[in-house]
Structures are given as C-alpha cells and as structure tokens.
Image (cartoon, grey):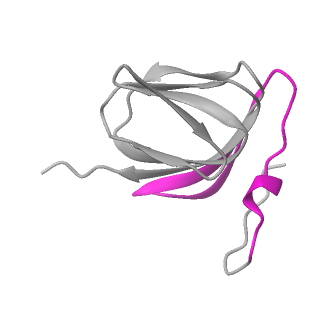
Amino acid sequence: MSQKIETAKVYALKELVAYAEGSTVSRILTKNESGNTTLFSFDKGQGLTEHTSPYDATALILDGTCQIRIDGTEHTLTEGEAIIMPANIPHALLATEAFKMLLIMIKNKQP
C-alpha cells in the first residue's frame, strides 16, 4: 500500500494512515537527503523505545494521545499539539491510547 503521494494536492493527513490492532503503521510522504515526513499510527500500548537520531524531529499529533519522553522528561500530547525532539538527544514514545502523528525529520547540520 506504499503508493506515491502526489504533490500540489490537499490531503486529510489522519485519513492517509490506518490503525492496525497491536501494531505501528507508517507511511512516508516525502524523503530526501535533508530529511523526511512520515505519518504514523500506533495502537494503544505500542511505541518506540528510547533512541537518538541525527535529525531534529517534530511530532504533530493528529489523533489520540501519547507520551513522549525527551532526555528523561515526560510530555503528554493530544490532538493538535506538537513537540520538537532535538537531534542527538535520547527520546521515546508510548501510545497511552491509539494515536496518529506526522513526524517531520530535518537533518541537523553540525558546524
């Protein structure tokens, strides 16, 4: 189901990725050497274990509720809220209920 997303077209983002029982689903919208934008859906209890990334990552919650931990600090986010996870800082997330998000990852250029 990984069909290419057309440009210059309007989309209802939370309709582009479905929930799957007991799973995490992702759909890449754009990708290049500078970063990518990906839609995710997480069933309740699913998540991403603590990790780091060379990208600054903005998580925009489209539906539901999640908990995002950045460098040991917990944040609860709901529909319409966003948070920036800085590059190279440990972060993790957990679906406290089923949720969908748009993740925007931009390569962090080190001097």
Quadrant housing residue 41: top right
Depicted 64 relative to depicted 110: above or below: above
Depicted 74 relative to depicted 56: above or below: above
Q: Residue furthest left?
A: 111
Going 12% across and 51% down the picture, which residue do you hit? Answer: 111
Find residue 110 and report its horizontal and vertical position in percent: 18, 48
Depicted 109 relative to depicted 68: above or below: below
Horizontally, residue 54 falls left or right of residue 99, namely left
Quadrant housing residue 13: bottom right
Going 74% across and 75% down the picture, which residue do you hit? Answer: 10
Q: Residue furthest bottom?
A: 8
Disc tally is 0
Magenta segment boundaries in residue numbering: 10-39
Going 67% across and 47% down the picture, which residue do you hit? Answer: 79
Horizontally, residue 91 falls left or right of residue 63, namely left
Horizontally, residue 49 falls left or right of residue 39, namely left
Find residue 92 and report its horizontal and vertical position in percent: 49, 24
Going 74% across and 27% down the picture, which residue do you hit? Answer: 97
Residue 8 is inside the magenta segment: no
Find residue 93 and report its horizontal and vertical position in percent: 55, 26
Please say whether residue 104 is visible from this viewpoint. Answer: yes
Horizontally, residue 1 falls left or right of residue 5, namely right
Find residue 71 and report its horizontal and vertical position in percent: 33, 24
Please say whether residue 16 is visible from this viewpoint. Answer: no
Give the camera-side residue of 55 and 11. Answer: 11
Give the camera-side residue of 93 and 80. Answer: 80
